[in-house]
Image (cartoon, rainbow, N blue to C red):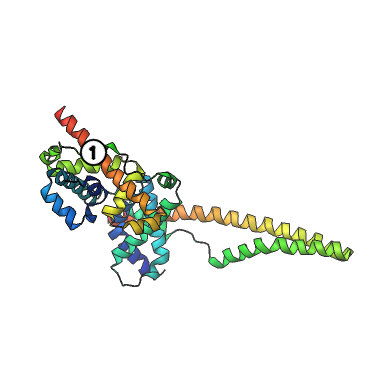
Amino acid sequence: MKHIIKKIWEDTNQLTDLDKKHLEECDLCKKEYLLAKKIESSIEKLPELNVPIEVDKIIAKVLLKPFYRTWQLILIGLWVVLSPFLLQLNVFSVIILKSDEVYAATILFVLIYMILILAFGYHFYTEHKKSIEEYSQKIDLFLENKLMKIQK
Amino acid sequence: MKAIDKKEFERIVKETYKMIYNLGLRLFNYDPHEAEDFTQEVYLQLYKNLHKYDGKSKFSTWIYSLALNLGLNKIKKNKRLKKIQSTEVLYESDGVLESNPELDYFAEMEDQFLMDKLQKELMNLPEEYRLPLILLFYEKLSYKEMSEKLNIPEGTLKSLVYRGKLRLKEKIKELKNIIKG
């Protein structure tokens, strides 16, 4: 009689009718099968554990989270991608045309570009900082209100 | 979202957060911090994707599958997965496969006692064994689904499930020795 222990431990659900017949006749394989089944069943019946987290905190964090608007992100992306090309185009024009006006325009362009980078960078930095502060204040307020409602 | 939707959202979270948190525990090594982060991430995604719910399945089923996909994606991106992928398919070389004529010990154990011990041992199993076992027997994913979602070959997953079960079997043997001891 050939034992099917390896097959049992691979997957009890994939035993054939022939294997099942063998289980009826072979005590050893049957015991292995029952143990494998118990192991599978212990996983199927894993208990749910208690949740130590504050559900209101989750709600507050999700509802009050600051989201950037999509169009803002698209504009920033376009600007980041396109501006170096525009700058390069201008530099090529200076080299080819050898014109003082184009040269002056390029310097102006570089200056504007740098000012814009600084201005936008500063704006987004302060906005981001502000939104984080507002966000935590909102969460505190939300949780305080909840607590007051419960106490009432 | 309008004010009324926020109330609806609160109701949804309150009804489902235990289920999602427990899924997080099972997927992320029973680490409460990771489970909490995961729970929050799920609700952020839910808040953004609520409009995609088409009502074809039960809402709890829909949110559960959204959470499971999110969790599996996180696991796929995680470095821990490399360990799983590098595990070779080993079937034949296991000494534990030899037949054991002394298997009556587990039959004598109380079912609930054995179940508790097995569940504790499952939590202590290395992640590469525990995760496929949980996905297969608790989450009821097929090998094909697991393979697609985790990007691990089916053969490797089968080997991990097989070896994970054998490890649990070994733990029961050790338990028997302690009891007899």
Look at the image and tell me in which quarter the C terminus of chain A lies.
Answer: bottom left
Q: Which of B12 and B130 is in front in this view?
A: B130
Left of B13 or right of it: where is B99?
A: left
- The image shows residue B77 at horizontal and vertical percentages of 46, 51
* In the depicted structure, whether residue B34 falls above or below residue A104: above
Q: How many labels does the image show?
A: 1
Q: Can residue A52 be seen in this view?
A: no
Q: Nearer the viewer, residue A142 or A107?
A: A107
Q: Which residue is outermost to the top?
A: B181
Chain under disc 1: B
Residue at 44% of width from left, 46% of height from top?
B82
Q: Nearer the viewer, residue A100 or A62?
A: A100
- The image shows residue B68 at horizontal and vertical percentages of 35, 57
Q: Is residue B33 visible?
A: yes
Q: What element carries label 1?
A: loop
Residue at 31% of width from left, 53% of height from top?
B135
Crowding around mark 1 (Cα neighbors within 10 Å: few <14, some 14 to 19, many 20+) is few
- The image shows residue B156 at horizontal and vertical percentages of 37, 49
Left of B86 or right of it: where is A152?
A: left
* In the depicted structure, whether residue A16 falls above or below residue B164: below
Query: Residue A101, located in which quarter of the rendered image?
Result: bottom right
Left of B20 or right of it: where is A27?
A: left
Query: Residue B99, located in which quarter of the rendered image?
Result: top left
Query: Residue A77, located in which quarter of the rendered image?
Result: bottom right
Q: Which of B180 and A9 is in front in this view?
A: A9
Left of A16 or right of it: where is B75?
A: right
- The image shows residue A122 at horizontal and vertical percentages of 63, 55
Mark 1 residue type: Glu
Q: Name the residue under label 1.
A: B98
Residue at 38% of width from left, 52% of height from top?
B38
* In the depicted structure, whether residue A7 falls above or below residue B108: below
